[in-house]
Amino acid sequence: MDFEETEEQKMIADTSREIAGEFGPDYWLEKEEEGEFGQECWDTLVKNNFTGILVPEDYEGEGMGMLEFSIAVDELASMGCAAGWYLGINAIFGVTPVKKFGTEEQKEKYLPKLAKGMEACMALTEPDSGSNTLNTKTLAVKEGDEYVINGQKMFISHADRANLMLLITRTTPREKAERKTSGITLFLVDLPDKSVTCESIPKHAMNYSHTCSVFIDDLRVPEDAVVGEVDEGWWAATEVLNPERMWGASLGCGLGTCALNYAIDYAKKRNVFGDPIGSYQGIQLPIANAWTKIQAARLLTRKGAYLHDKGEFYLDVANAAKHVATDAATDACWTAVQTFGGYGFAKEQHVERWWREVQLMRLAPITGQLELALIGQHILGLPKSFRTV
């Protein structure tokens, strides 16, 4: 692996910082308080072709890889710009499944639109399934040349805005499936549709991105809405979930860096008893320790993106990167709040918001406990610690 960035990668990093400079923490604080989507920032990302990073050139995209995408997300977040969250929802849930498993007709229909900023979402989690995707109950029943779908999804980001939904269903109930991993089918659903309704869920943070309950009542989709193979969608879903972890790790590296940079700047300027607080080991050493963790997480994240782009096995690195980046970002955000002292509790300083936001990484797109369970079982060869696949 070459640690020297290419000219393209440097350009992505530079442009990311320019965009983040225009849409920095104050912008996102306002959007958070108002519960508004950052439309101006999204439009700027589209204008600069960020929404086409993972789209092949044949479909009007930039034809780049996960490494370039990771750099963009990391750099945006490092300057307090939350747009990397928007980018990931679009690219991981929209571009990735279509590019990897879509028919030529599906690629021609969706990829150019996604490159130009059409928004996507993924409807996976359900009230009773959580991380156990195999317990999905949303059912698609074949009727002639259509499927009729009914079910409920939970915690679906951007379902209220998306024009394309990657919908994970069962076409064979679990109790009738030949294998526990069979019976899952993925669909590409055009939205809006009167059979799909959404309700936003009030939440702790990141209210510039709505998270929804989704209700699906007699949704009819044609046969050609299936992406991948009928009843074998589990393996296609994993090809979305692993890149999702790389995206989460990239967000963590950036968010942790941003919080630390704020803490470092404050520790240099804030004087107590005649000295900057950064001169006291009680402040300086936690900051330095958090910084080292972020650097290690970033290296692991870049390695995972590199392996992904080379088409090599990276399940171990994807889960490890997400786990390490989450821990590092959590430590960095908490250290920032502590460095600011009482000011760390004030919204105007932003660090309390980042502390709230980093909590999501501990829960999604996969919990820290499940990351370790997957590594223990599939990489280290240990017995199942609970019902993982």
Image: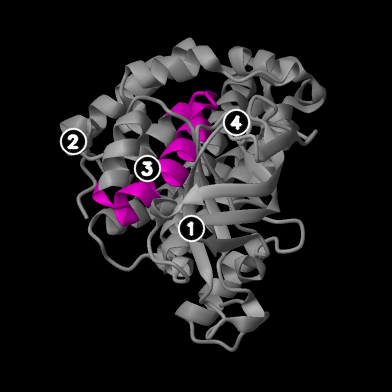
Let me know if residue 292 appears in the view.
Answer: no
Q: Secondary structure at mark 4?
A: helix
Q: What residue is drawn where x is 53% and y is 68%?
A: 184
Tell me the distance, in whole angstroms, between the alpha carbons under discs 3 and 1: 14 Å
- Kindly report the distance in space between the C-alpha atoms of the residues bearing marks 2 and 3: 13 Å
User: Viewed as shown, does residue 145 lie left or right of 36?
Assistant: left
Label of residue 186 in the image: 1
Q: CA distance from mark 1 to mark 4?
A: 38 Å
State the image coordinates of residue 245 (x, y, percent, origin top left). Answer: 49, 53
- Kindly identify the amino acid type of the residue bearing the numbered disc 1: Leu
Residue type for callout 2: Glu
- Which residue is the site of mark 2? 57
Question: For the residues marked 2 and 4, what is the alpha-carbon distance in whole angstroms?
Answer: 36 Å
Residue depicted at x 54% and y 51%: 167
Looking at marks 4 and 3 on the same chain, the residue that comes earlier in the sequence is marked by 3
Q: Earlier in the sequence, mark 2 or mark 4?
A: 2
Q: Which residue is mark 3?
A: 95
Whether residues under marks 1 and 2 lie with C-beta atoms below 8 angstroms apart, the answer is: no
Q: What amino acid is found at the position of numbered circle 4 in the picture? A: Ala
The residue stretch that appears in magenta: 76-104
Quadrant of the rendered structure where residue 331 is? top right
Residue 263, percent from left and from top: 62, 27
- Depth check, mark 1 against mark 2: the one in front is 1
